[in-house]
Amino acid sequence: MNTVTARVTGIPEHKKTALECDFPIAEVSRIAEQESWRKEINRPLSHIHKWWATRLGSVFRAITLAALSRSGIDTWKSFYECHHFTGKVVLDPFMGSGTTLGEAVKLGAKAIGCDINPVSTFMVRQAFARIPKTELHATFARLEKRVAPEIRRYYQTRDPRTGELIPVLYFFWVKTVTTPDGETVPLFSRYVFAQDAYPKKKPKAQIVCPSCWAVIEDRYDATDLECSLCAHRFNPQEGPASGQYVTTKHGSRSHIKALLPSDGRPLAHCLYAMLALRPDGEKVYLPVRDEDLALYAEAEARLQRESLPLPTLTVRPGHNTDQARGYNYTHWRDFFNARQLLGLGLLLRAILDIENEAVQEQMLCLFSSTLEFNNLFCSFKGEGTGAVRHMFSHHILKPERAPLENSVWGTDKSSGTFRTLFESRLLRAKQYLDEPFEVDFERDLFGEQIDSRKTVASKPVRVRVVDSWEQLVGTDNGLMVLNGDSSALALPDASVDAVITDPPYFDFVHYSELSDFFFAWLAPVLKLRYPWFARPDSSDKGEVQHKDPRVFAKQLAAVFSECCRVLKDDGVLAFSFHHSRAEGWAAIHEAITTAGLTVVAAHPVHAELRAASPKAAAKDPISLDAILVCKKRAQADVANLDQGAVIQKSMTLANKLRAAGMSISSADRFVIVASQMLIAFSANGSTDFDSVCLMLQQADQAAQSGSQGGRPPQPPHPLTCGSALGGSGWIVK
């Protein structure tokens, strides 16, 4: 029979935090799932600018609330209440987009955020900056009057119906290769270039003729089509590009990379279609004509004449950049065409002329956010949804074979432009400071959820952003935002009530490699103002990021050790984590143990929208995070669990989430099992990396067999305390 025993340390139950004892995983997961559908709308403060793997605010509100409350408090019943944790201090050593900071100050606590990446520090400062919306509107209006006409001039076409000039929302381009025999081949995988997000309901689509480049309207699934203009017959579903190969008109097949230009430039592009906007609001697809090509050439020529603040930074080799470099994208400037560089350069030059520095930085943040949707790595999502698929939708720098050129300034019908993001990102974030709401559900008389709603559960966020501990202590509403290595914080010992964070993934998203895209534009104009921008790129030797899990564990341990130093004895360090491989969990365990901490609880909660691009591409996607709750080793009550007890607890948690309507994949189940195993490892202090990996794999296999059989099995290899695997690790009997 499986048993669970507790190691007693003499800490009274009432002195524990609520987060150590229980957590409303089902209720929080329901709200989190609702939030995840539109994160930028439901938590605009942490989405003022692009950041990667931004966690859900509702989850971190619940974590922070439970971490600052004593046991016996019902976290869920308190979730929508207005709280005043006056005097409490919350630290996030991996600040990222500032999610933890936002939730902490909304609960009335002070917050400290630190990140080693300058883009993170800049965007968080801008998110919390209190700038009157009237001043932002006035500045935007001045920019619109001064520079918008210059930019819009290059984003228009002539309406064939009226002969009048009308704005172009999007230009459609395709990469081309030139074969050894001189044939230029467009890299279309199919000739359908625009269709509805739900094509079976709305089958109308736009197709380009491969012979005369006419734009044809037909069904998205058409397989036999004759062009009404040139009578060319073709199958719209079969383009010359397939996988890594391209086929010529004569049937010869070549590897695309073998046809890259010998002079080191990226592949050429051909402009073939446009989506324009008529005065009555009608959107119309049009083919490209000579006048349109001449307008682009004019922009190209002006770019050569103008002196504009454009990026010069090279793309450094890296895990997330090598794919782009492999296609000759060696400078960040290469990620834009001439018209985009001209429009962005004109806009940035005008922003730099704004005299009010605080307002100027708000516009710089907005400008930087606009870059994500205005480059050659964007693509068309289709009709019936947000039109522009931004460049980081897959967390990698994947060159687009059929890129979409957005309109830099844009119209009220645009998506991802300076104009639309002013409303949807910048102003929405400022409005959230005034009315910080939570996602909630309306219910019928029987308590059933019928619709989502927004509930204001916090006072307006009015914080003073400070740079030092002394300044933080001297203000009632302080927010300390730092840039630097979190393994060396300028904070006193035992000064922080809770550490709440989301550490980087060791082998997935290398933040600084991707953030260089923004850094290349921001650093040249901000390096004299902020010393953390005065560096070659956004990387730092103190980054916690490495493909070797053991090196990653050492890096993370250095930060966690510093967190342990500044954490009060009765405080908790809580962080979210998920990983599909045992090595990731072994690295986390090693970092926690080395830092002098112990895992005392682990709570699985909804973390990711399963339909998000990186998730949708995975065969077995993870939608759960484990919230790992740690305490200083001397202050921890830790349950000694055998493998059977771990699996029993894991199945109970999984069933609780299923009962709440969540789908649990086998990868999600591993997250639950692995997080519970970390509690068991903490009980005996095992730090042996290989044995931890082995036991995690064994537990996962046992859990799989248990879930298939409907009940937890007796473990085939019982695990007990021993020293055969190095120190006080577990041994396999």
Image (cartoon, rainbow, N blue to C red):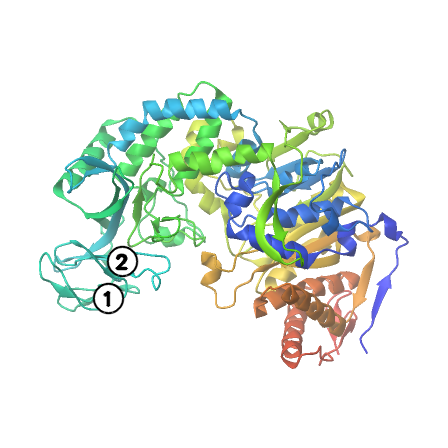
Height in image: 286 above or below 136? below
Height in image: 143 above or below 341? above
The amino acid type found where label 2 is placed reads Ala
Instruction: Identify which residue is drawn at 39% across, 41% down.
Output: 416
Tell me, yes or no, if residue 555 can be seen here.
no
Quarter-of-image position of residue 407: top left
Pointers 2 and 1 in contact (C-beta within 8 Å)? yes
Height in image: 678 above or below 573? below
The amino acid type found where label 1 is placed reads Ala
Q: Point out residue 353 in the picture as x, y percentages from the top left corner.
A: 39, 20
Write down the residue under mark 2.
205
Write down the residue under mark 1.
222
Q: Residue furthest top?
A: 355
Q: Point out residue 441 in the picture as x, y percentages from the top left corner.
A: 61, 51
Q: Is residue 536 left or right of residue 218?
A: right
Instruction: Identify which residue is drawn at 20% across, 47% down.
Output: 286
Relative depth, front residue between 492 and 548:
492
Q: Which mark is residue 350?
A: none
Tell me, yes or no, if residue 604 can be seen here.
yes
Height in image: 673 above or below 608? below
Q: How many marks?
A: 2
Q: Quadrant of the N terminus?
A: bottom right
Circle 1 Cα neighbour tier, 10 Å, few/some/many (<14 / 14–19 / ≥20) = some
Q: Is residue 251 left or right of residue 685?
A: left
Relative depth, front residue between 562 and 155:
155
Q: Point out residue 166 in the picture as x, y percentages from the top left corner.
A: 23, 37
Element on which disc 2 rests: strand
